Amino acid sequence: DRASDWLRHGHDRDAAYDRVVLHVVGEADCDVFRTNGERIPQLLLPCPDEVQRRYGELLRSDIFPPCHDVLASLPKLKVHTWLSSLLVERLGRKAEDVRSRWERCGRNWADAFFITLARNFGFGLNGDAFEDWALRLPLRAVDKHRDNLFQVEAFFFGTAGLLDGGEEAGYCQDLRREFAYLQHKFGLPAPMAHEQWRFLRLRPGNFPHVRLAQLAYLYHREEGLFSRVVEAESLEDIRKLFILRTSDFWTDHFNFRKESPHSAKTLGRGAVDLIVLNTVVPVLYAYGQYRSDECLCERASRFLEQLKAEDNRIIRQWANAGLPVHTAADSQALLQLQKAYCDKHDCLRCRFGYEYLKARSTPR
């Protein structure tokens, strides 16, 4: 930066900058002063032209990633070290989200787990709506009736605002009556607005009705689900917890209005693994940090290493550039790289960006 940027930013009139003892610049085009008129010593530290040119290439490149031509040649240890650091960043950020939910729900870890689980049952498009729904859900009231799946569904669908409408199946009317009774019994607030739920471009199997029915079945079946997740030692033990079905009504319905071909509304293996990736792993990691239990944090990381890498456009781009992408640990690290560095053009803090500048600025 130029020394004159000090004036352009108004630092010469801001007493907060009077404590600066040395002004380091790339171009000393003027002297700079404190608010009392004292001159501040300056150190000229110009950036080599070659480095500046290559940095400009990183920012202007139309090819993603802009550092692609050095990635395949980097030593495996350097790649592994940076991806490991990125994974820790990613887990830390997700753990912060979990802790935020934990604070919002009265510091109850079982509730924070359920809210995180609910969000991820939205599978992207309805994530916000599911989290809002779970935060509204009167879980202590539901607990009093969790042995009755019909009443759990009444709580779930009623709170979601999906029991209001025109011509629906008789089952919906039964749930509506039951929810009205439960509302009166527990003094429940108004439900969500139906408009919060999104249906456009959703496969029927991913409709909110189906996902809520699956969550209701899980809540009904698994009292102490969070404890079972914490106690599970293996990935297969975790997967077994999410072998789900629904009440009979949903075997031939995707919503309350129309019948559909008979099919069990279960979670496929891919969906279960996404739940493990986005719910179980970050909650275990956050809980391990809270308990200062390294074993839980290591187990969360181990589950990531046992899951397959996600397959999406971003991950494929990195794989095509020559990076190893085998496990969910790899793909999660690369998503962190994309969102925290590439999207912000923060190449100077990225070790791959550093290697690009270093390699290109070395005389050949």
Image: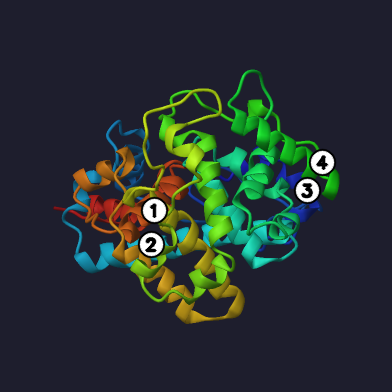
Which amino acid type is marked by label 1?
Val
Foreground residue among 357 and 120: 120
Dot 4: what SS? Answer: loop
Dot 2: what SS? Answer: helix
Dot 1: what SS? Answer: helix
Tell me, for residue 239, which label it has, or none: 2
4 and 2 marks in contact (CB < 8 Å): no
Image position, residue 160 (x, y; %): 66, 37
- Please state which of the two labelled residues, at mark 2 or mark 3, is closer to the viewer: 2
1 and 2 marks in contact (CB < 8 Å): yes
- The residue wearing badge 4 is 189
Which amino acid type is marked by label 3?
Asp
Relative placement, left or right, of 209 versus 19 is left
How many numbered discs, if any? Answer: 4
Image position, residue 137 (x, y; %): 70, 48
Badge 4: how crowded within 10 Å, few (<14), some, or many (20+)?
A: few
- The residue wearing badge 1 is 272
Relative placement, left or right, of 74 versus 283 is left
Foreground residue among 150 and 317: 150
Q: Who comes first in sequence, dot 4 or dot 2?
A: 4
Relative placement, left or right, of 280 versus 12 is left
